[in-house]
Image (cartoon, grey):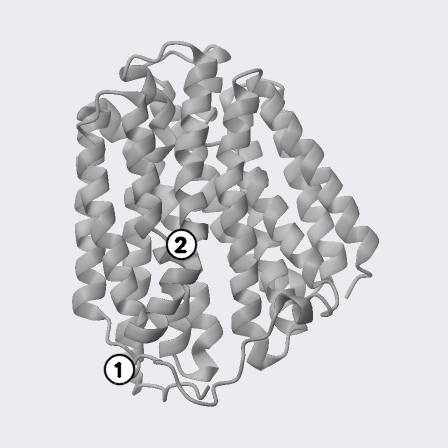
Amino acid sequence: MTAPAALPAPHWRRNQAAVTGAAFIGFTGFTLVMPFLPLYFEQLGVRDPGTIALWSGVSLGVTPAVTAAMAPAWARIADRFGHKLMVVRSLASFVVIMSLMAYVTEAWQVFALRAIQGLFAGYGPIAITMAAESAPPEHTATAIGWVQTAQRLGPALGPVIGGSLAQAVGLRGAFLVSAGFYVAAFLFVMVGFRETGAPRRAAAGKPAPVSFAQLRRVPHFVLFMGTVFGLQLADRSFGPILPLYLLEIGIASERAPFLSGILFTTTAGSAALGNQAAAWLLARRGVGGLVPVACAIASVGALVFASAAPIAVLVVMAIGFGFSMGVAMTVIYTAATKAVAVPDRGAAFAWLSTAYLVALAMSPVLAGALGSLSMRAVFLADAVGLGVLAWSVRRRMAPV
């Protein structure tokens, strides 16, 4: 398949701004409310902390699980009608779902809406594809990097804004504000983005995409997938239990939304810095040396969280945890890109995204289930898992 011709510079830069802006606004809008889902379940009448953690876990996990199952179907539709339609469709669905979330009265209704949301979600990976395809080849890496940074910075700001909103207008009102954010993201893409060419409809003689069996023969590719999965499993485990954990260690209920927002924001912001620093660090230390160190530092951060340390210490640990996770994730994606032949990179990125989505689905469910027994056990499990990941990468990859 021949790549579509690059647009003139003003058009691709306009596309870049539209996709980056929509990603930032959308991810900010999502994290205005989702980190506080445990507190919302409490408002809905669920009193037992273990049950709250379980509802939070399955509700956070069901959306990416359904999204992963729907991804092949939506990919075929995008191939026929273009990626812009897919992103606009996804953002419009978030406007509706987030608005309805403000009016639920039972815990199961939150879960049901999150399941429906999974049918239409997934604009994040598509936004990266849109940025890459619309940019000239010499600017592809920059285009992808800016969208990834926006997807990190949105969650860095969203929780602290959401914590303040929860105190000012309540959690129900915060869902309506979140819907407003998605309206803005929808307009960014609808008005600002121009499709780079005709949609890629079925073409005679189109080469078959590379299979997973072929990618498995690429050195370390399965390890790269496993590392992406493991990193996301740990990174997303805080969501279902952190606000409840703060209550458990003695934080006043009126302060829990704001302080958990600070911790979520600190972690996400530090991860964005890690994404940006990864290239500089990778030039000085190989993948086989850098990723294990990053995983080990994140493991220590998870251990400190399990110790119920003071908030100031937890904030410092959140910085180290987030930065290390950001570095490790960017380095792994960079290494995987370099390991795969150029024509096969699209398929390779799709498999890495599958590992990411499966972890995104499993992590909150597992964290919620484990948190229903012991919230500290979630952080301990993260520490052990990251330690094993550090050992595995170090053992299987010589510094390269």
The amino acid sitting under disc 1 is Pro
Q: In the figure, residue 108 lies in which quadrant?
A: top left
The residue wearing badge 2 is 70
Give coordinates of residue 271: x percent, y percent.
Answer: 51, 48
Q: Nearer the viewer, mark 1 or mark 2?
A: 2
Q: N-terminal of the two: label 1 or label 2? A: 1
The residue wearing badge 1 is 10
The Cα atoms of the two marked residues, 1 and 2, are separated by 34 Å
The amino acid sitting under disc 2 is Met
Q: Is residue 214 left or right of residue 245?
A: right
Task: Answer yes or no: is residue 309 visible.
Answer: no
Q: Which residue is found at the position 31% from the left and 51% from the top?
A: 120
Q: Secondary structure at mark 2?
A: helix
How packed mark 1 is, by other alpha carbons closer than 10 Å (few <14, some 14-19, many 20 or more), is few
Give coordinates of residue 379: x percent, y percent.
Answer: 60, 27
Q: Is residue 362 above or below residue 398?
A: above
Q: Is residue 363 left or right of residue 301?
A: left
Q: Which residue is found at the position 38% from the left and 81% from the top?
A: 202
